[in-house]
């Protein structure tokens, strides 16, 4: 789903370290991931890996738009593992570290954008009074 980019020096999602992270991260999404991979291979007419890069990209783009929960689960697992990789973080100009305890500087935004949410009536069950 994410190819190697030599221009930016980033690995592909098929890098062994990233694949190992993906495998560790699947957890409860395993049935959805299996469904996703089976559907991708089916659409590939064999195996996804046997397609050239252009055909793989086209297949993923078409499938991801209509793949439902299976596509979302596969995308979530792959992207999370990919963007945890130190090489990818450095290529994006970030320090390869956890966000805490040092934290990151976050630019202040327009807090007034939350006013409609603050004015909205509660839509959850409030059991604090019990």
Image (tube, helix red, strand yellow):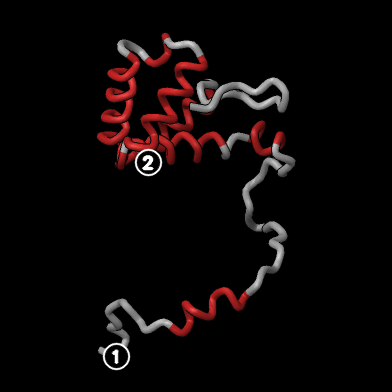
Tell me what residue is drawn at x 72 percent, y 60 percent: 105
| Image location of residue 100, percent across then percent down | 63, 56
| Image location of residue 16, percent across then percent down | 52, 21
Image check: 27 left or right of 101? left
Discs 2, 1 touching: Cβ within 8 Å: no
Residue 34, placed above or below residue 52: below
Image check: 28 left or right of 117? left
Tell me what residue is drawn at x 57 percent, y 74 percent: 113
Image quadrant of residue 34?
A: top left
Q: Which residue carries the number 1 mark?
A: 129
Image quadrant of residue 24?
A: top left
Furthest residue toward bottom = 129
Q: Which residue carries the number 2 mark?
A: 72
Towards the viewer: 22 or 102: 22
Residue 29, placed above or below residue 43: below
- Whichever of labels 2 and 1 marks the residue nearer the N terminus, that label is 2
Q: Dot 2 surroundings within 10 Å: few (below 14), some, or many (20 or more)?
A: some
Q: Secondary structure at mark 1?
A: loop
Camera-nearest label, 2 or 1: 2
Q: Secondary structure at mark 2?
A: helix
Tell me what residue is drawn at x 54 percent, y 75 percent: 114
Tell me what residue is drawn at x 49 percent, y 79 percent: 116
| Image location of residue 128, percent across then percent down | 32, 86
Q: Which mark is residue 76?
A: none
Distance of label 2 from label 1 (alpha carbons): 38 Å
Residue 105, placed above or below residue 37: below
């Amino acid at each position: 789903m994410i190819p190697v980019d030599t221009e930016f020096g980033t690995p592909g999602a098929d890098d062994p370290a990233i694949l190992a992270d993906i495998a560790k991260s699947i957890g409860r999404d395993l049935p959805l991931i299996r469904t996703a991979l089976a559907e991708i291979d089916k659409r590939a007419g064999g195996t996804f890996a046997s397609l050239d890069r252009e055909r793989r990209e086209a297949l993923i783009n078409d499938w991801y738009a209509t793949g439902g929960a299976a596509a979302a689960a596969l995308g979530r697992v792959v992207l999370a593992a990919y963007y945890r990789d130190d090489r990818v973080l450095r290529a994006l100009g970030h320090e390869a570290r956890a966000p805490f305890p040092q934290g990151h500087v976050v630019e202040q935004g327009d807090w007034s954008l939350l006013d409609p949410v603050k004015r909205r009536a509660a839509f959850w069950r409030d059991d604090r009074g019990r």
